[in-house]
């Protein structure tokens, strides 16, 4: 959160003032936990007779709650003084006009639930109670949890409090919507900046220049113990799949782009994706119909807060109502088991579409329990919530205890996701410490390991990491064969789910549960190859691996048992003079010794003519040309190669660091450090100064210097803003609202806040700050201007945190001073900033709400008073929000 964004929210607040007061702030859906008897088992584990008793108990309690809602309609009044529209259902209560000699009760049903295998009917000829079927949106069944039953009820705060004290009620918690990552791009193929970045990624590992396919299936089988080996040649970037089947510690000139995986590929395993939906028209979702590997890819259910839908036809494969193109759901499904971009290419894929309410997630978990196969089913959840929910924790526990494997994302808040439920920074599902939790690293590698995503969550409960930037099917406007890429922490979890599915298909004799799978994934993971986890709260350093770690090279295709050395000399000459056919090297260069030397990033020493490279049989270069290419490269990256000495002044250092931290500079440094630049060869023959001794340690030190410098400049800006706080509490909305009242001097005379602002702005401190001729803002807030100048170089998720736009402050100041000067009020001749005791904000809001609901007079003056109160509240909120930011930064 930043000051600019706070002011933007203030503008929205003022523009939508009437709308805000019309909103409902007290009424909400609640999860209500009903326990019939302490000795009850889980509903599905009880016999039919006990289930009938539980059904009757639940229905009776729902009637009781419905009656309480009806009796307390007056507590559902909105802030605009009107009745909540959702209570209109009460007017259609069938009991009102239902005539019978029997006592009548509602029979709460869900006609849309075609998945229900039970028909509830409590009425009989001997019964004194008549049950009238009714489908309600105010009170609904949700799901059994543990040994109790959860229902959903639309309650006011007062009714929720009353219900929570009823007999047999375990708890009553608000059902909130949860956080969902929206980083999956919307047609980013048209985004020039992303394409430029993607082109750089492609240049790193261009398959056209990669080494030929050399692999020995028997060697791979011996290493992995797979029943069979499949190999996928990758021709897209980011290439997340190849990371799963080899070590990241590799000479990048010999990087192997292939993805190696067991032939079983998840066959016979079900993966359930709980997400926003799915469209299966893309060729990534091949079901291999008519082959021995035929599988199912289905939309099993659409489960929303007020609605459920269960497709009746298996051909009804597309499911989405929230988003026209549910790219996030498409992405996670593809990562788990897509035939082109996924891991478990033969697994059955099931989408359960939800609206991200607590109720919909509980229903989705319950669907898996009722329809999934324990020990053969994996559930993927690629979103998280920023608060604790007891109902979700206990339903998750039930799901795992039933034999289902659950894999969740760590989240993308750059926070410790393992804190306890008592902590205000709790993050679920990781914070429950039950599911297998997955963080994310960049899919770009340089041969020295992985680099964690800047925004991935961390903590000791994160079990494993996976690739975060991936290629996935992009579906829009009926175009079904496009691809795109995303950088999203949530993509790592379904990749791990896919690996888990291949492990299970390779070992059908093993009955995997959540803990055994966690242990297996950890044992198979590659340890200590993520380079920047040192300061991340004891986070385990593990990267997902499917069992194959070896780096495949050309030599792997040689016959291990060939001990015949008679023809070794001839066999070793692959190209040039002395080879059997004077062969040329189609890729790379032909060395002095007749070897085809392949490279991706720069020529090796053997490719220099000075070292005997045979130019007529392949590519060759010279020392001078290599030096020239390096000089051109360094000139192109001149902005990246800057002095970051801590002895420099903080502002000068800050400007240098701003270039140093640009994403393409970071990538260039990684190339230099890991010998992926032509300069890696050229510096052997000429000194280039700064880069000669560049290594990981030097670079890390420079990064740390720049981080510390950023904090210094940021803190200086914050201190300056605090010093000038009373001068800076201006924005367009405040000025504009007072302008509307400028013809009524009497209102200004009675407005202490207006007088207070004018006195402060006329003080010497503020007058000096806003001296435009002397460039007062920039001179006095130099560090803030410096921060704002480099916002474009910061990651997108940091710009809102650090930007402080001062462009219009002269305009705001001059406009407000004009109001002060034309108001006919005599202001104090003061050289100091004055303070004004603020009214109790709660009482202001209460008075304002009362004035809105029961206005004493509907006249112009009354409306103006309301506007003044709104402005006061706006200023108060802006100041309070700025103070909150400062305190949070200190902490």
Image (cartoon, grey):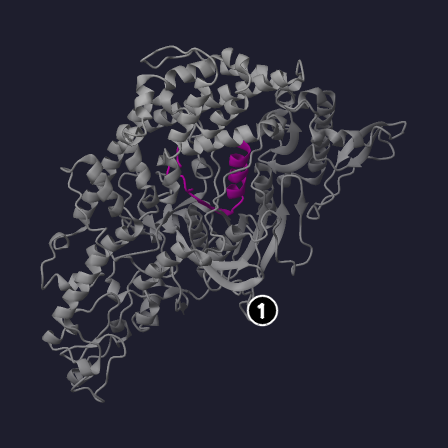
Mark 1 burial class by Cα count in 10 Å: few <14, some 14-19, many 20+: few
Q: Position of residue 581 (x, y in %)?
A: 23, 89
Q: Position of residue 723 (x, y in %)?
A: 31, 21
Q: Quadrant of residue 176?
A: top right
Q: Compared to 361, does 311 lie above or below?
A: below
Q: Is residue 282 visible?
A: no
Q: Compared to 94, does 867 lie above or below?
A: above
Q: Quadrant of residue 767?
A: top left
453 or 185: which is nearer to us?
185
Give the residue at x 34% y 16%: 763
Q: Position of residue 278 (x, y in %)?
A: 57, 54
Q: How many marks?
A: 1
Q: Most extreme residue toward the bottom, as rendered?
A: 581
Q: Is residue 110 visible?
A: yes
For label 1, the SS is: loop
Position of the C terminus, as image quadrant, is top left
487 or 357: which is nearer to us?
487
Position of the N terminus, as image quadrant, is top left
In the shown orientation, is residue 37 left or right of residue 730? right
Give the residue at x 61% y 42%: 363
Task: Tell me, yes or no, whether the highlighted magenta stretch contains residue 637.
Answer: no
**Residue at image mark 1:** 289
771 or 760: which is nearer to us?
771
Which residues make up the magenta segment?
A: 390-419
Q: Position of residue 260 (x, y in %)?
A: 38, 65
Q: Compared to 439, does 763 lie above or below?
A: above
Q: Quadrant of residue 150?
A: top right
């Amino acid at each position: 959160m930043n000051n600019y964004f706070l002011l933007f929210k203030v503008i929205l607040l003022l523009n939508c003032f009437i709308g805000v007061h019309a909103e409902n702030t007290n009424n909400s859906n609640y999860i209500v936990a009903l326990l019939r008897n302490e000795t009850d088992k889980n509903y599905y584990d009880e016999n039919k007779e006990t289930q009938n008793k539980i059904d009757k108990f639940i229905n009776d309690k729902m009637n009781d709650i419905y009656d309480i809602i009806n009796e307390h309609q007056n507590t559902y009044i909105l802030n605009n003084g009107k009745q909540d529209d959702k209570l209109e259902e009460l007017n259609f209560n069938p009991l009102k006009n239902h005539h019978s000699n029997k006592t009548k009760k509602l029979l709460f049903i869900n006609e849309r639930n075609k998945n229900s295998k039970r028909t509830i009917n409590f009425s009989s000829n001997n019964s004194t109670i008549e049950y009238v079927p009714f489908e309600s949106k105010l009170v609904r069944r949700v799901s059994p949890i543990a040994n109790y039953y959860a229902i959903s009820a639309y309650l006011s705060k007062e009714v929720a409090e009353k219900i929570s004290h009823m007999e047999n009620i375990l708890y009553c918690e608000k059902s909130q919507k949860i956080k969902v990552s929206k980083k999956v791009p919307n047609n980013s193929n048209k985004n020039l900046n992303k394409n430029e970045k993607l082109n750089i990624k492609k240049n790193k590992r261009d398959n056209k220049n990669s080494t030929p396919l050399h692999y020995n299936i028997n060697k791979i089988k011996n290493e992995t113990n797979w029943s069979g080996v499949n190999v996928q040649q990758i021709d897209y970037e980011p290439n997340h799949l190849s990371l799963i089947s080899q070590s990241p510690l590799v000479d990048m000139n010999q990087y192997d782009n292939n993805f190696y995986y067991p032939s079983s590929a998840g066959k016979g395993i079900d993966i359930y994706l709980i997400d926003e939906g799915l469209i299966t028209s893309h060729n990534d979702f091949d079901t291999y119909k008519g082959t021995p590997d035929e599988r199912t890819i289905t939309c099993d259910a659409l489960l929303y807060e007020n609605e459920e839908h269960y497709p009746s036809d298996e051909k009804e494969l597309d499911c989405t109502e929230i988003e026209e193109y549910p790219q996030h759901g498409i992405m996670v499904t593809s990562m788990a088991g897509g035939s082109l971009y996924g891991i478990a290419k033969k697994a059955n894929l099931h989408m359960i579409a939800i609206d991200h309410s607590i109720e919909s997630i509980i229903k989705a978990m319950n669907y898996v329990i009722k329809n999934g196969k324990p020990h053969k089913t994996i559930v993927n959840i690629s979103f998280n919530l920023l608060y604790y929910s007891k109902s979700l924790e206990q339903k998750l526990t039930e799901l795992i205890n039933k034999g289902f494997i659950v894999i969740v994302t760590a989240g993308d808040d750059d926070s410790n996701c393992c804190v306890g439920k008592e902590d205000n920074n709790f993050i679920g599902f990781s914070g429950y410490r039950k599911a297998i939790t997955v963080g994310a690293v960049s899919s770009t590698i340089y041969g020295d390991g992985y680099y964690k995503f800047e925004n991935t969550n961390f903590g000791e409960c994160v079990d494993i990491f996976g690739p975060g930037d991936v290629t996935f099917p992009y579906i829009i406007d009926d175009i079904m064969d496009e691809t795109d890429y995303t950088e999203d922490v949530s993509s790592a979890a379904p990749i791990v789910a896919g690996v888990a599915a291949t492990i299970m298909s390779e070992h059908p004799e093993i009955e995997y549960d959540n803990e055994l799978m966690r242990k297996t994934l950890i044992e198979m993971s590659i340890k200590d190859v993520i380079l920047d986890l040192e300061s991340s709260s004891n986070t385990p350093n593990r990267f997902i691996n499917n069992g194959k770690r070896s780096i495949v090279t050309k030599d792997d295709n040689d016959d291990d048992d060939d001990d015949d050395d008679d023809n070794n000399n001839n066999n070793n000459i692959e190209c040039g003079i002395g080879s059997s056919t004077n062969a040329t090297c189609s890729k790379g260069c032909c060395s002095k010794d007749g070897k085809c030397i392949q490279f991706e990033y720069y020529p090796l020493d053997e490719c220099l003519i000075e070292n005997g490279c045979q130019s007529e049989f392949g590519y060759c270069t010279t020392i001078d040309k290599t030096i020239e290419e390096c000089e051109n490269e360094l000139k192109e990256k001149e902005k990246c190669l800057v002095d970051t000495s801590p002895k420099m002044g903080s502002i000068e250092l800050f400007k240098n660091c701003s270039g140093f931290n640009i994403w393409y500079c970071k990538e260039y440094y990684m190339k230099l450090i890991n010998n992926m630049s032509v300069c890696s060869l050229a510096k052997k023959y000429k000194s280039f100064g700064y880069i000669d001794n560049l290594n990981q340690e030097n670079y890390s030190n420079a990064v740390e210097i720049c981080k510390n410098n950023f904090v210094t400049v940021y803190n200086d800006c914050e201190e300056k803003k605090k010093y000038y706080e009373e001068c800076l509490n201006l924005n367009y909305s405040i000025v504009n609202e007072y302008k509307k009242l400028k013809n009524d001097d009497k209102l200004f005379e009675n407005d202490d806040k207006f007088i207070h602002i004018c006195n402060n702005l006329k003080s010497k401190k503020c007058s000096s700050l806003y001296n435009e001729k002397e460039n007062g803002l920039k001179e006095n807030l130099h560090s803030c201007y410096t921060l704002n100048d480099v916002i474009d170089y910061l990651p997108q998720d940091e710009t809102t945190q650090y930007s402080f736009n001062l462009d219009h402050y002269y305009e705001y100041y001059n406009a407000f001073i004009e109001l002060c000067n034309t108001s006919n009020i005599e202001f104090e001749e003061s050289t100091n900033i004055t303070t004004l005791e603020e009214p109790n904000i709660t009482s202001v809001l209460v008075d304002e709400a009362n004035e809105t609901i029961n206005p004493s007079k509907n006249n112009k003056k009354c409306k103006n008073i309301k506007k003044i109160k709104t402005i006061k509240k706006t200023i108060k909120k802006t100041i309070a929000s700025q103070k909150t930011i400062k305190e949070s930064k200190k902490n």
